[in-house]
């Protein structure tokens, strides 16, 4: 068993974590000042979303220089200090690495624009116009066409994301050599791993432009998701960088079936340590569409989670477990009750996640039950994806009201609100004006939560502790109980010595269920349990973890 399989990862979105210089944007010195807090929580690794030099059109996922820290976050010295301060506390640092695209302000792209003969031109993906328009009908994940015309070259470049984020051409060996060199530079700094952004999109099908404009609207994902050479490219990174440096790596794998996720993460293949996949957080999409008002059925959620649990384990893959990250609205607002049952809901989600097989991730604020932003005006949003989607919805005839409601539910900006440290106006996040302002004052903060008895933070600490000390939670098999239950999610984890049972009531009504004889409570979000003669009554949003004597 590898250490990182027992550990918990904490995701920091630096821009919204802790500002130290009053400019309203979180920074590296802010993170350093909170390392003791994270150590107290008990996490073993931190994943930092990108802090490289960037114009910030996608909050750092648009990298202008892979070798520099953006001055907004601090200096390279600050970064090195963060690394050594984290290591002193036995916390590893995983850097986000974006290899599918760069910013259009990256010097590689600036060179690429100069001429078709420039050696950097082929670092990106270019196509000639077809009958005077885009080479194909693909849409960008940030709305509109995935192609941008450059008149000086009479060519289009591909951008699967923002128009300012051109896709890199991994078929070009020189590009790959540059990337390996750059990854080695970071490895030599002493970091402990990478979270690899949309890494399963880096190998595009050679024939993609043949998908012409006349075929039905398509986002083209079949032509670039888990493409023909992706496993070779990742294995090459493993051989050159990840393996020799004993890195912990996690791949962001959108739209990926279990069979592929197994390939990426089975250690025999020497690619990645673990996989982020997203089927469970798409469970409230209507007909697969994100920008809709969605509802979900618990049985859909539990059947997705269960398929990933059993099949990844059977075939030697490894899951990265999460409910939240900087791209998701808060799960507490989405799957549970963020109002009357806020504490219970936060703890229930934590318990369900930590009971599963894989490595759990906490996104900043989960440990104090942060919830959605509930913005009421499009002007409050900064995120290009959300703003573009809003305009697209209006263009398609939707009312402003409905479009805003949809954003309230689905926008990723919901999870980007600054961290709530104390009860002051901007929660001790900044002494200036925060880059993203909350709509309402929320009375949940680290200060308040830590003063409360049986608080959420301590609940997370208990779960982190349990995972370190009960190996059945790490290596035990998983079994879903009562697959048709639409109110209570019950599953077991077991090996030949121990058995753990997790039960979580996802409703605001009491639910009675059978429990086999011989189970004791290890942890529950109400502190006790109501078990009588083989029947447990689960109170609203109650969750319990039991162990067989
Ligand atoms: C996934 C990142 O998590 C997201 O924030 C970003 O917009 C896209 N990849 C593009 O890099």
Image: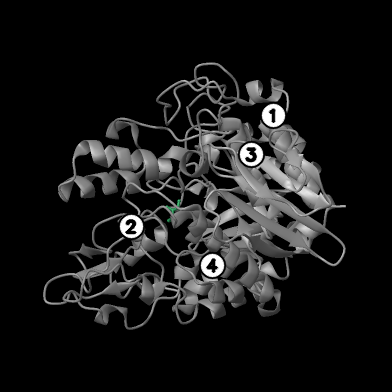
Residue 378 in the image: x percent, y percent?
A: 28, 35
Which of the two discs, 2 and 4, labels the residue nearer the N terminus? 4
Q: Given this view, does label 1 or label 3 mark the residue nearer the observer? A: 3
Q: Marks 1 and 2: in contact by CB < 8 Å?
A: no
Which of the two discs, 2 and 1, labels the residue nearer the N terminus? 2
Residues 85 and 298: in front is 298
Q: Which residue is mark 4?
A: 179
Q: Marks 4 and 1: in contact by CB < 8 Å?
A: no
Disc 1 to disc 4, C-alpha distance: 44 Å
Q: Residues within 10 Å of mark 3 (few under 14, many from 20)?
A: many
Q: Which residue is mark 1?
A: 455
Asked if residue 278 can be seen in this view, the reply is no
Q: Which residue is mark 2?
A: 289
Q: Marks 4 and 3: in contact by CB < 8 Å?
A: no
- Give the SS element for disc 1: loop
Disc 3 to disc 4, C-alpha distance: 48 Å
Q: Given this view, does label 2 or label 4 mark the residue nearer the observer? A: 2
Q: Residues within 10 Å of mark 4 (few under 14, many from 20)?
A: some
Which of the two discs, 3 and 4, labels the residue nearer the N terminus? 4
Which of the two discs, 1 and 3, labels the residue nearer the N terminus? 1
Q: Which residue is mark 3?
A: 542
Is the CB of mark 2 within 8 Å of ligand 1?
Answer: no
At 63% from the left edge and 26% from the top edge, which residue is drawn?
446
Q: Residues within 10 Å of mark 2 (few under 14, many from 20)?
A: few
Which of the two discs, 3 and 2, labels the residue nearer the N terminus? 2
Asked if residue 403 can be seen in this view, the reply is yes
């Amino acid at each position: 068993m590898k250490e990182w399989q027992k550990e918990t990862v904490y995701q920091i979105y630096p821009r919204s974590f802790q500002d130290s210089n009053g400019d309203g944007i979180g920074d590296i010195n802010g993170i350093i000042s909170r390392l003791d807090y994270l150590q107290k929580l008990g996490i073993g690794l931190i994943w930092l979303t990108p802090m490289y030099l960037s114009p910030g059109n996608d909050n750092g996922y648009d990298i202008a220089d892979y070798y520099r820290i953006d001055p907004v976050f601090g200096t390279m010295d600050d970064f090195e200090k963060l690394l050594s301060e984290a290591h002193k506390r036995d916390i590893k640092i995983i850097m986000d690495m974006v290899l599918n695209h760069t910013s259009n302000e990256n010097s590689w792209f600036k060179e690429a624009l100069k001429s078709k003969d420039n050696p950097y031109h082929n670092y990106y993906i270019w196509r000639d116009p077809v009958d005077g328009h885009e080479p194909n009908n693909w849409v960008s994940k940030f709305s509109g066409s995935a192609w941008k015309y450059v008149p000086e070259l009479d060519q289009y470049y591909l951008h699967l994301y923002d128009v300012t984020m051109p896709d890199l051409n991994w078929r070009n060996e020189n590009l790959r050599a540059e990337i390996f060199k750059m990854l080695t530079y970071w490895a030599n700094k002493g970091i402990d791993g990478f979270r690899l952004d949309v890494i399963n999109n880096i190998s595009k099908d050679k024939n993609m432009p043949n998908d012409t404009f006349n075929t039905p609207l398509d986002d083209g994902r079949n032509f670039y998701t888990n493409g023909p050479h992706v496993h070779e490219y990742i294995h090459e990174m493993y051989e050159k960088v990840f393996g020799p440096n004993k890195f912990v790596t996690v791949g962001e794998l959108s739209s990926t079936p279990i069979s592929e996720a197994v390939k990426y993460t089975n250690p025999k293949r020497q690619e990645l340590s673990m996989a982020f996949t997203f089927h469970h957080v798409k469970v409230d999409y209507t007909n697969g569409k994100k920008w809709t008002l969605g509802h979900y059925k618990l049985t859909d959620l539990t059947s997705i989670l269960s398929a990933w649990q059993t099949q990844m384990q059977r075939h030697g893959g490894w899951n990265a477990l999460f409910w939240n990250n900087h791209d998701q609205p808060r799960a507490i607002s989405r799957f549970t009750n963020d109002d009357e049952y806020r504490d219970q809901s936060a703890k229930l989600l934590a318990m369900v996640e930590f009971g599963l097989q894989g490595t759990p991730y906490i996104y900043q604020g989960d440990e104090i039950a942060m919830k959605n932003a509930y913005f009421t005006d499009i002007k409050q949003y900064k995120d290009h994806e959300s703003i573009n989607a809003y305009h697209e919805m209006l263009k398609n005839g939707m009312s402003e009201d409905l479009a805003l409601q949809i954003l309230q539910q689905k926008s990723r900006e919901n999870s980007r609100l600054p961290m709530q440290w104390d009860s002051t106006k901007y929660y001790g996040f900044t002494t200036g004006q925060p880059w993203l302002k909350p709509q309402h004052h929320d009375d949940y903060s680290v200060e308040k939560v830590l003063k409360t008895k049986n608080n959420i933070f301590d609940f997370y600490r208990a779960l982190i502790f349990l995972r370190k000390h009960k190996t059945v939670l790490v290596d035990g098999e998983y079994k879903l109980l009562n697959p048709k239950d639409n109110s209570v999610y019950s599953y077991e984890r077991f090996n030949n010595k121990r058995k753990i049972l997790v039960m979580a009531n996802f409703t605001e009504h009491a639910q009675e269920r059978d429990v086999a004889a011989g189970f004791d409570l290890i942890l529950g979000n109400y502190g006790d349990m109501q078990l009588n003669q083989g029947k447990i009554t689960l109170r609203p949003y109650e969750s319990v973890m039991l162990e067989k004597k």
